[in-house]
Image: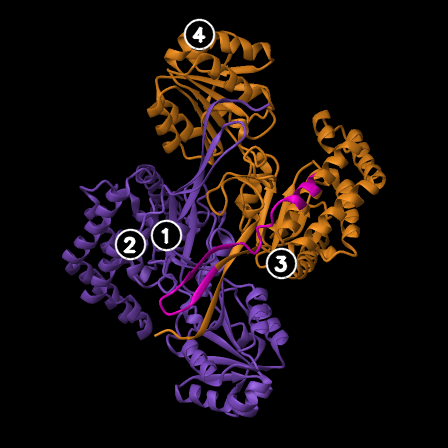
Chain colours: A orange, B purple
Amino acid sequence: MSEIQTKNEVRTESEVRAKALLARKAAAVLARLATERKNEALLRMADVLVRRQDEILAANERDLERGRRQGMPNGLLDRLMLNPSRIAGMAEGLREVAALPDPVGDVLEIFRRPNGLEIAKVRVPLGVIGIIFEARPNVTADASGLCLKTGNAVLLRGSSSALESNRSIVAVLRDALAGTAVPADAIQLVEDPGRGAVDDMLKANGLLDVLIPRGGASLIRTVVENATVPVIETGAGVCHTYLDASARPDMAEAIALNAKLSRPSVCNAMETLLVHREFAEGHLAGLLGKFRDAGVELRGCDRTRRFAPWAKPAADEDYATEYNDLILNVRVVDGLDEALDHIRRFGTMHSECIVTESAENAERFLREVDAAAVYHNASTRFTDGFEFGFGAEIGISTQKLHARGPMGLPELTSYKYIVRGNGQIRR
Amino acid sequence: MSEIQTKNEVRTESEVRAKALLARKAAAVLARLATERKNEALLRMADVLVRRQDEILAANERDLERGRRQGMPNGLLDRLMLNPSRIAGMAEGLREVAALPDPVGDVLEIFRRPNGLEIAKVRVPLGVIGIIFEARPNVTADASGLCLKTGNAVLLRGSSSALESNRSIVAVLRDALAGTAVPADAIQLVEDPGRGAVDDMLKANGLLDVLIPRGGASLIRTVVENATVPVIETGAGVCHTYLDASARPDMAEAIALNAKLSRPSVCNAMETLLVHREFAEGHLAGLLGKFRDAGVELRGCDRTRRFAPWAKPAADEDYATEYNDLILNVRVVDGLDEALDHIRRFGTMHSECIVTESAENAERFLREVDAAAVYHNASTRFTDGFEFGFGAEIGISTQKLHARGPMGLPELTSYKYIVRGNGQIRR
């Protein structure tokens, strides 16, 4: 907190505080609702979103206009843009979440102690979840649905460029909750566009139980480095694919191309290709030609550039960068140890892959690489809540505490111990 | 970080950083060790602790002497003091940890996706655990044992009053590791007595995977409010016992007395007794007399003071205080709702108890109270890793993320997804 507070900052702090307090009260009600009541609310939210799409689209158009006026790049405009099909997608997402099993109330363990105490470990909601996100306004509906299903209230803070859209979606969702068992206050949007509002969320210990940032590397870094509320770090992915000496050339090529090209802008896409020198001799020139044909800019080590003279030289800074774009680092290594060293140094503990026919090398890679998801002979692009079969995803955790990898509904819960006795006291 | 760094602060920072880096390297080795290798190291640590107890006791005597000279209170001196029996207890603790099952490598889930991918969720160590603790030097050995067993390296920071003792114990433990498979660098002690060293630990993102503070409320608050490394908040307990209208008087009395008197200085001891007005009419005067006879200072609401005129009046500040001492707040309430409101307002989500013969009230209490452990007809003093049967305890978490309540060995682990394919790519 700066020493001199402007009036605006004072106002900001009270907005976060006031809305978080409302969310806490709603969370206490929500935590005790039966699954059916929560599902009714989710289905109603889906219906009303579609029914009132015109006002959402009008609000979105105002955001888009302002963006165009301010010279927002086309990529960002596309992420900001809503249309009937995208709203239908948001509604469908809510319906799918309603159909998923409710983890709250699950008995994780139950045991009886020699003194007769019966101890049950039971899933409960986390409480109030703060979500700080960028651009895409669909996160407003998606995150609200996942939080409500798991009995949590949510305090949302989107980017100012999407404020009109987010405000409209939240108003519609809150209206939809009227007449359901879920209190409208379970969904809160922080509207203050200033940086101060984010700071307030980062320090809202006792009001927020967890913060989940969803966005680019710089947003995530800001949250992790400044928050005192517990954070689940998501997303940043400098993912590697290592083609071992014994890799089957056709499989190696398919996996490498898929890891980079199927969707370069996402966190589980490959940023660096590591290639055993023996594999490189026979197959690297051809593979790099295909990347070039697909419009990928290559940055390579010296040995790589013998196979692809058009590649730029790669520096450490490149190896550490999450491009999320058609740019790829390529490095030829002498073997598994060098590949493991490289991943240890530059990886972000997200998703890492080895392509090999050697069972021994595969097992070493799977055991020794410290990442949320480690792959043998499959594309890193599978690190995803839906691809893992969770039916939902609030983000992909790259930290080790609480949750790691794709987070579905159970990752939005905690637990408590319920102890039943008949007069036991401690000696 | 202050803008002007003194030379001391610069040195401090590099001590934490240098030792955390050594710990990280050791952690990579430790993470892959077989259970048997880790157990051998733990048993050897136990043996060498006992064999070299004289030098530990001599170091402890230097701490005690300085403490006495500086007027340290007797309670603190007792916590600081080591003797052969306490060292034998530390050694025994290490042997017990060696005998516990190793959670690392456990397959938590394994499933096959329609595309043939086999996904296993496997327990792995957290990495490097930072522990900031007060007074008791036995934490040095206890925490090292729990961390090593779970494949984690540990960076310890004790209080400066115990520096000689901690340094000696760590030196002995590290020596004991020579000739075992566990690298000595897996145990690190931050020796700089300055506050700057703690600050460095709080901000050591990327070097420490988690921080666990063990100590009083002020230490824990400092860590929670300033750390950007993920924290597991432990310990602070403003625990309540609510005696409902239908409580059996003998059971209610036994539980209330046990919750306060069996060990007033610990976090699961009762700080506030809530009593239904009907129960109070028949039984409160007698119960409060017993507390008085046991030397407990009472602070009561107006209605309480009708039954115990000698009690001081209780203010909100009292209700919010963890005394850890022979002081007790007492409040007469009109019923369960008022008790629940009081706990919501003043509880620290640690341990809460209802004594009642009403199944309905018991279930409402167990469901609605948001705490790590909720009890029906049993003393809150059971919130403890050993009493729960975990065989170990690194602390009692009062947060909801990652771990809640008593933390045993599994709570010192994370997991990763190991994905095995045969060429799968994402469409």
| Nearest to the observer: residue B134 or residue B339 | B339
Q: Determine the CA span between mark 4 and mark 1.
A: 51 Å
Q: Is residue B319 above or below residue B223?
A: below
Q: Is residue B239 left or right of residue A61?
A: left
Q: Is residue A217 left or right of residue A29?
A: left
Describe the element under mark 3 as helix, strand or loop. loop
Instruction: Tell me which corner region of the image, top left, top right, bottom left or bottom right, holds residue B253.
Output: bottom left
Question: Magenta segment range?
Answer: A93-120
Q: Which residue is mark 3?
A: A31
Question: Magenta stretch: residue A99 in it?
Answer: yes
Q: Which residue is mark 2?
A: B97
For marks 4 and 3, the one nearer the N-term is 3
Question: Which chain letter goes with mark 4?
Answer: A
Q: Which residue is mark 4?
A: A306
Q: Amino acid at mark 2?
A: Val
Q: Amino acid at mark 4?
A: Arg
Instruction: Tell me which corner region of the image, top left, top right, bottom left or bottom right, holds residue A161.
Output: top right
Mark 3 is surrounded, within 10 Å at the Cα level, by few (under 14), some (14 to 19) or many (20 or more) other residues, namely many
Q: Determine the CA span between mark 3 and mark 2.
A: 37 Å
The reply to whether dot 3 and dot 1 touch (C-beta < 8 Å) is: no
Q: Which residue is mark 1?
A: B409
Q: Determine the CA span between mark 4 and mark 3.
A: 61 Å
Q: Position of residue B417 (x, y in %)?
A: 46, 36
